[in-house]
Image (cartoon, grey):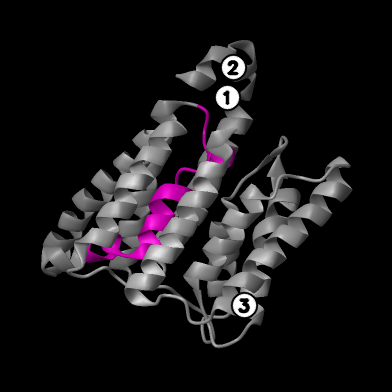
Amino acid sequence: MINRYLPPLFITCILIIAHLTFGILEAYERTFVAIVTAIAVELVLGKITYGKWPHPASAYISGISVGILIRSPFLWPYVLASVISIVCKYVLRVRGRHLWNPSNFGVSVVLFLAPATVSVLSVQWGNNIWPMAVIWTLGFFIVWRVGRLHVSATYVVAFVAFGFLRSAITGTPWPATLAPITGPMYQLFIFFMVTDPKVAVSTRRGRIVVVILVAFVEMLLRLAEVIYAPFYALFLVGPAALVWELMSLQPAIRANPQRASN
């Protein structure tokens, strides 16, 4: 039960530390509206679909992620991204599984549809290492508690490795290619989006391969100068891997349930 509350507490910690350090929130009310919208849509759809009220923890994470990540002078992108994030869990499903991390889907769709009025958080910690150190320590502890440390750690290693490769290809100094991972945006990406157990493949080895592919596709998108490369990379790779497993390996998993714990 305690593991259910650790991610919401941690993402709130990211919000508080990042805002007190750099003032990342443009307006408290926009983040509040994103959270309330996500929870309200989750409760309504959960009640209609399953006949009972769902626990709001997942919706809270989606809403606060939208509130932290989205940048817009208007209120509607926060509402729209939260609505899309929750609705995708109930509509875009294969064999009883939703395919996308909700906030990754919602943020990616809004960024794609309204690039002129919506952007994403791009603040970096810079030389102020202590806030990042606190968040990374807490983050790695929490993903360890929920059995997803290998996913976050693999992504970080892959990002660094591909960052050096991008530096060699483009001639950009390697500190510049690695700098994005020091920002609050990437803390959400590393500890919440790529580790989402609801949309992960069933095996440990598979999750490692998938997150390396996410980092690889992100590198390709960055080389193509795609601005929101990490979001689009996860948007493309994660669901494709899950669908492939569900369509091709599900019979084997049903015959051998222990496979899911490998």
Q: Would you say 55 lies left or right of 65 here?
A: right
Q: Above or below — where is 54 with respect to 175?
A: above
Residue type, mark 2 in image: Ala
Q: Which of marks 2 and 3 is nearer the N terminus?
A: 3
Residues in magenta, as a range: 179-202
Give the residue at x 64% y 17%.
Answer: 254
Inter-mark Cα distance, 1 to 2:
5 Å
Of the numbered discs in the image, which one, if any, rests on residue 77?
Answer: 3
Q: Position of residue 166 (x, y in %)?
A: 20, 60
Q: Quadrant of the C terminus?
A: top left
Magenta segment main secondary structure: helix
Q: Which element type, helix, strand or loop, lies under badge 3?
A: helix
Residue 28 vs residue 82, the one in the foreground: 28
Of the numbered discs in the image, which one, if any, rests on residue 252?
Answer: 2
Of the numbered discs in the image, which one, if any, rests on residue 249?
Answer: 1
Q: Position of residue 63 (x, y in %)?
A: 61, 62
Q: Above or below — where is 143 with respect to 248?
A: below
